[in-house]
Image (tube, rainbow, N blue to C red):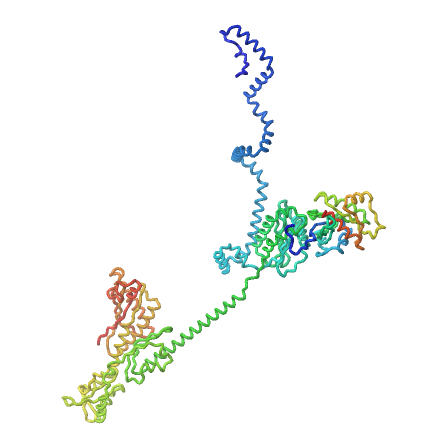
Amino acid sequence: MNRLPRGAVKDVVLKQAKVCMLGAFAVGKTSLVSRFVKSLFSEKYHSTIGVKIDKKVVTLPGVDAGDAPREVTAILWDLEGEDDLVKVQTTYLRGAAGYLLVVDGTRPETLETAVVLRRRVEHEVGVLPFVLLLNKYDLEDAWQLDGDMLLGLREASVATFNASAKSGLNVEEAFDALLGAVMA
Amino acid sequence: MTLDTSPESETPSESSPPVTAEVEGALEELRQLLNGPEREEVAGLREEVRAGQLNAKSLAQVLPSAVRLSGEDGTQLADALSPTVDRAIEVSIERNPQPMIDAIFPIIGPAIRKAVSDALAKAVSGLNETLEHSLSIQSIRWRLEAKRTGKTFGEVLLLKTLRYRVEQVFLIHAETGLLLHHVTAPDVAARDAELVSGMLTAVTDFVRDSFAGREDDKGAGLQKLRVGGTSVWVERGPHAVLAAAVRGEGPEGLREVFEESVESVHQRFHQELEGFEGDNALFVGTDPDLSRCLVSAQMPRRGKHPLMRWLLTALLLAGLVAGVAFAVRSTLRWNRFVTALRMNPGVLLVDYNHNWWGQSTVAGLYDVRARKTPYMVLNESEVSVGEVLPNWQIYEKFSRRTDSSVSAGEAMAVNEGVDPAAWLKAPASVRFKRRPVGVSGEVQWAAHGAASHAWLKKARVQLAAGGGANGVTLTAASVDWSAVTDVDAVALEVATAALAAVEVPMPNGADVSSPEAQKQIERAADRVREVARCAAALNYRFTLVLTGHTDAAGDAQANERLSLARAEAVAEALKIKLKVLGERPAAMVKVGEGSRRPRVPGTALDELQKANRRVMFEARLESR
């Protein structure tokens, strides 16, 4: 760190990271983050080029007690949802430091898609830390997730959260957990 | 050969003692016992060496490991092999180049394609600019400026055609699309650069994945995006991408600026780029590289110059109009002055020359008793006195007898009641004065003044016939005419002198087309007309002699021919001028004087010698 920007606050370490948001079609990825991130681009980018870039600044505690807090700018690549017709463009995964894997708790097939996506990430760019988000927690009564498959993902993940885009439950926590793992 | 075990050599010679043979046999047995197997092996080896089998077979076994070992030790083997390998390649290519071509093609093909397509892309986009600028006056000026300042024309073009502004420059990490550094031009409102950087990378990736079909296009990626008046230029390096937002029409030369910046960033931040882990603070030092790309400029300001040009043109035009007006006015005034002089009795204008910017000249004769002297005419005219350099001579004959003593006689004559003036119907310009009675006892009259030749002639005839009034008889002897000026004779004298003063300059051969020659011929025509008029009044036969002259250079005969040709050429031109004036052409004699009568001695400078190439005029007058 011999070249500190003139305006930078010295006791905060500034870092950036590219993180991706992956999940099946209509699992609520965009809704999950739209309340918590800074958006510049409109939704229609999804359908045109398959990705939308957002930004989220997360402040993490120092590595050891007494260290300066770390401020991380997450550049969030919200990739178009995958279904039978649309495949996630793997080029967009290049250079990612981690990802959020989103599953719709009410649709078991989205869990299968998540497993496929994770495999694809590992094939394309290698093993990356990820956080599993089980969305639509507000509709918990309707959850129908396969226990084994979920268990496998849950164990591989940095952390797994029950989340709700509606209430905003656990969204911040999910980001903190992912970036904490990325920056570790 | 200690190992020589062949049976032939074992056989002892006939002369050998039997004891020795015995010993030999024992020794041989011992040898056989001690190293029999080795001897056989050695014999076998020798056979192999002789047959050359060892080299190929066993070498093939050991060579790979030998080469490997040698490679680990250093470059000795490579050094030793390289000339042989070089030669082998040469021989191979000489014999059959095709395999080599096939091998190299996949490498060279894309390289050449890339080079050609880059060059073409640059050429095509540069073409418009070239067409636009190559033929204009401005481009010539720029080329001159390029020469003067030692820049290339391209650089000057870049500086001069600035119709754009590089508003933002992003340095983006190639792999992650994360922003490394970002600079903006002053007063540019930048949106969130980190997001733009990411989106730009996404768009670039998208375009490449969607449209770049060929494998070798993949590394190239998007080079330019255009949205309305703004374009984004993308210049990529191995680790970082530079994206510049350019408003307006950026010239293709900008690309080079961006290229240089990317190269410089890679050179200076190589390690930081390779080990990038999201810490963009490390790239603050790229600021100068990026800021260098913030080229901004306006269209060349055209407003100022046309105004200046208009002003200048207007001034010039005004000056021209004023000049013409001045010249016209000056000429008109001069012409009125000359006419006034001509019309003024008692003044004989001989020569004049009007000069707009210097002093004009007038020359002539005048009678002191004229009602208006030429000086008075000048004072009354619109021509200012300072402009004119006068050369007026008082005509001698006019003023010979102006002493007041004569007036007494004049009074007497009137008293006598004899008036020769009335009898002879004399013009007002002739006065008669009575003289004291001479020896003959007859009344003597002295006439003075000026009169036309025609009247004088008539008066003489009348007197010769005799006659009188009031009982006084007048005869030829009664009047002394010596003080009377024959106006026509004087005019002739003046006119001939004026004619002789005209010279037609002929610097080139017998060419009379030069303005100066034409002017002089016109002058000559005027004077010839005057001489002819006076000569007619005096009843003289007038012949115009034109004499051509040359300078001393060249052959005398040729000079004579040339001088005659000059005289003839001027004669022809003069005839035409006279015709225009409505004058009957005078009789003309053309003379070629060669260089016999130079105006400037032949030893003078060449430039002065020119004055010798001329045609001169002379009036030859004979009484009929």
Near-viewer residue (B241 or B606): B241
| Above or below: residue A25 compared with residue B47 | below
Residue B568, picture quadrant: bottom left
- Name, please, the residue furthest toward the right: A141
**Furthest residue in direction left, as rendered:** B439
- The reply to whether residue B596 is visible in this rendering is yes
Residue A38 placed where, x, y %?
72, 56
Toward the viewer: B45 or B547?
B45
Residue B623 in picture, x, y percent from top left? 21, 76
Q: Which quadrant would residue B74 be assigned to in this image?
A: top right
- Extreme residue toward the top, this view: B18
Lateral position of residue A149 relative to residue A89, left or right: right
- Asked whether, in this view, residue A115 is left or right of residue B580, the answer is right
The residue most toward the front is A66
Q: Horizontal and vertical percent for residue B624?
A: 21, 76
Looking at the image, residue B406 lies above or below residue A49: below
- Circle count: 0
Residue B538 location (% of width, % of height): 24, 79
Residue at 48 percent of width and 69 percent of height: B313
- Which residue is located at x 56 percent, y 9 percent? B25
- Foreground pick, B466 / B58: B58
Query: Is residue B217 shown to the viewer in this render?
Result: no
Does residue B143 appear to the left or right of A149 in the view shown? left
> In the rendered view, would you say B417 is above or below B88?
below
